[in-house]
Image (spheres, rainbow, N blue to C red):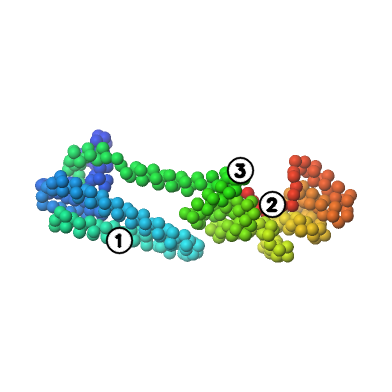
Amino acid sequence: MCEKCYYKYMDINEYRKLLFLNSQYCSYYKVNNNTVLAGVMRNNGYRYAENLSDDKLKDVNKAYRKYIALLNLLVAIEIILYVYFVIFPYYLEFMNLPFFVVVMMLSLIPLVALYLTYVVVNALYEKYLVKSVGVFQKMKFQPKVKYVEENVFNEYLNTSKKSVYFFVLILLVFFSFILTPFVINYFNNNKEFNSALKLSNSYLTFMPIAPDVYVQRAYAKFNLKQYKEAVEDYENANKYSFSKDFNPDILGVKTYYLPYSQVLNEFDNLIALEKNQPYKYYLMSEKAAYQLKNKDYKSAYATFNYLINLYEKGTKVFFSPSLVYNNRAIARNYLGDKSGAKSDFVISRKMCPECKFNLDSTMIKKP
């Protein structure tokens, strides 16, 4: 009978037996009055020229499962150590290496280490077999359905599968990894900044290369007036996203604690580097608002006047015209131009009747 036909007409019990043969629960089979034991490396088999007793097989099975547990533990430790002592600390360096070098370091080296672990644990298991069972003949471990003992198979069916619990644990870890940033975002949206900060701290302890979570934590720290710490997180977000997307947020936070002259210099540098002209005008409006906030009315008025002239000519801009009119009105008022200030206030209110204007930076984007 062809192999395809065999699988087509195979009943469910035979299918379960095939699953059993490929599982770690199948640790031996008997053929021609010989017992063949499985190795930790499943291709390895150890043939004994006798039918081992049930008691001896029970002892061997217990030992086999202990060595498999040892193997799994060592593999898990190796992966964790590799991730936390190689990948995370040198993540940025890896990303700057040629692609084939990264593939070698992130795949080949760990695979070699894992293979050597299998070899070492398998060698320890072989020593146990020689000591506890006797000398064996090496061969391939090739169990077949016809060699399956019904009592062993029934015991397999009735044994709780620890792998299921492990799989559930992996799923929980995976979904925690995926969903936690959304929970942090929920806390920030609801102004529960302390909760957002605590959860971000926990997440970044285990995943210290997540730019989105650095942004969430930076936003929470900013609202908790931890300005320097917020800047550090925005810088990390830039670093791990390989971008400069959060430079405006960084400067926005700096407006709350750095000296006036230093902030103006940083504004000038950011504006000079900006290639998008409409966004450059937005940065200029933010600089002028900062000058207005620091009572440099004359400088602020000159910039607002320039920006409004651009807007009235139909130039594409990214700043809020109503906010700029409002801010020019404030500057005009302090400079003694009461009628001009009144006119700008009227225009601003017509543009946005529901707006509540203030001089806080709008450069700090809500994640």
Query: Is disc 2 placed on a helix, strand or loop?
Result: loop
Can residue 12 be seen here? The reply is: yes
At 67% from the left and 54% from the top, the residue drawn is 363
At 82% from the left and 60% from the top, the residue drawn is 298
Query: Which residue was labeled with disc 1?
Result: 116
- Percent across and percent down for residue 269 are 69, 64
Q: Between disc 2 and disc 1, whose residue precedes?
A: 1
Query: Is disc 3 placed on a helix, strand or loop?
Result: loop
Q: Which picture quadrant has residue 15?
A: top left
Query: Which residue was labeled with disc 2?
Result: 362
Q: CA distance from mark 1 to mark 3?
A: 51 Å
- Percent across and percent down for residue 246 are 61, 56
Query: Which amino acid is tagged 1?
Result: Leu
- Percent across and percent down for residue 232 are 59, 60
Compared across the picture, whether 186 is left or right of 329 comes to: left
Q: Which picture quadrant has residue 106?
A: bottom left
Can residue 7 be seen here? The reply is: no
Quick one: label 1, few (<14), some, or many (20+) residues within 10 Å?
few
Query: Is disc 1 placed on a helix, strand or loop?
Result: helix
Q: Quadrant of the N terminus?
A: top left
Compared across the picture, whether 12 is left or right of 139 comes to: right
At 43% from the left and 64% from the top, the residue drawn is 101
Query: Which amino acid is tagged 3?
Result: Asn
Query: Which residue was labeled with disc 3?
Result: 190
Q: Between disc 1 and disc 3, whose residue precedes?
A: 1
At 20% from the left and 41% from the top, the residue drawn is 152
Residue mark closest to the camera, 1 vs 3: 3
Q: CA distance from mark 2 to mark 3?
A: 19 Å
